Amino acid sequence: MTRLLTALILGCLALTAAAPARAATANRTIALKATVATACTVDVTDLGVALDVVTGETKRQVGSVVENCNDGKGYTISVNSTNNGKLKSGTNTVAFTPFYDGTTGNGSGSVSVTRSKATFAKTASLAVTIPANAKTIAGSYSDTLTITIKAK
C-alpha cells in the first residue's frame, strides 16, 4: 500500500509539473497631456489714404485688420486715437469718428468690438468719418490709430 500511495503522489506531482502556469495580468496606464498657449494677433494694413477735411469724409476706409485669436471664450479688439479723436496740425484740430467692422466709435476716437469665440483670419475694415468744414485752417493734420487685441 505504501507503494501505491507513493505511486499516486508521484503521479500527481508529475501532472502538476506538466500543467501550464497561469500568467498574472497587470495593467498600467500612460497619461497623455497637452497645453496650448493663448495666442491673439492682429495684422494691420494702412491704406495710406489722404483724407479730405474740407469737404469731409463718410466712413472712408483707412485700413484693414486681420484678427486671429485662439481663446475659446473670445476676445476684444480696441482702436484708440493718440489725439483723442482729433487730427492735429500744431494747435489746430479736426474731429473724426472711427468705425471698426461696422461698429461706431465714440467722441474720443475709440471703438471696441467683442468677439464671443475663437476666430482665425477674420478681416475687418477700419474707417473714419470727418464732418465737412470749409473753414479748416491750412496745415498738415495727423493722428495715429492703435489697434489692440486682448483675449477674454
Image (tube, rainbow, N blue to C red):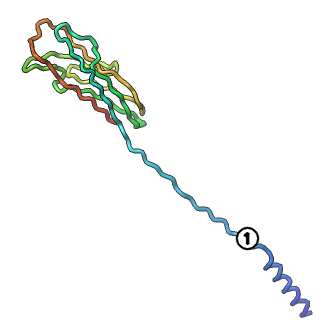
User: To which quarter of the image does residue 122 belong?
Assistant: top left
Which residue appears farthest toward the left when viewing the image? 91
Residue 10 x, y percent position in the rendering: 84, 86
Q: Quadrant of the N terminus?
A: bottom right
Which residue appears farthest toward the front when viewing the image? 48
Left or right side of 3 for 135: left
Left or right side of 31 for 68: left
User: To which quarter of the image does residue 37 belong?
Assistant: top left
Query: Mark 1: few, some, or many residues within 10 Å (few <14, many ≥20)?
Result: few
Q: Quadrant of the C terminus?
A: top left
User: To which quarter of the image does residue 16 belong?
Assistant: bottom right
Left or right side of 107 for 15: right
Residue 89 x, y percent position in the rendering: 10, 19
Q: Nearer the viewer, residue 80 or 6?
A: 80
Residue 92 x, y percent position in the rendering: 9, 17
Disc count in the image? 1
Which residue appears farthest toward the bottom when viewing the image? 2
Above or below: residue 57 compared with residue 115? above
Q: Which residue is drawn at the image coordinates 58% and 62% (left, top)?
A: 28
Q: Which residue is drawn at the image coordinates 89% and 93% (left, top)?
A: 2
Above or below: residue 130 compared with residue 77? above
Left or right side of 108 for 6: right
Q: Which residue is drawn at the image coordinates 24% and 20% (left, top)?
A: 48
Look at the numbered disc 1 and give the secondary structure of its residue: loop
Above or below: residue 81 compared with residue 71? above
Residue at the disc numbered 1: 22
**Identity of the amino acid at label 1?**
Arg
Above or below: residue 151 compared with residue 3? above
Q: Which residue is drawn at the image coordinates 38% and 33% (left, top)?
A: 68
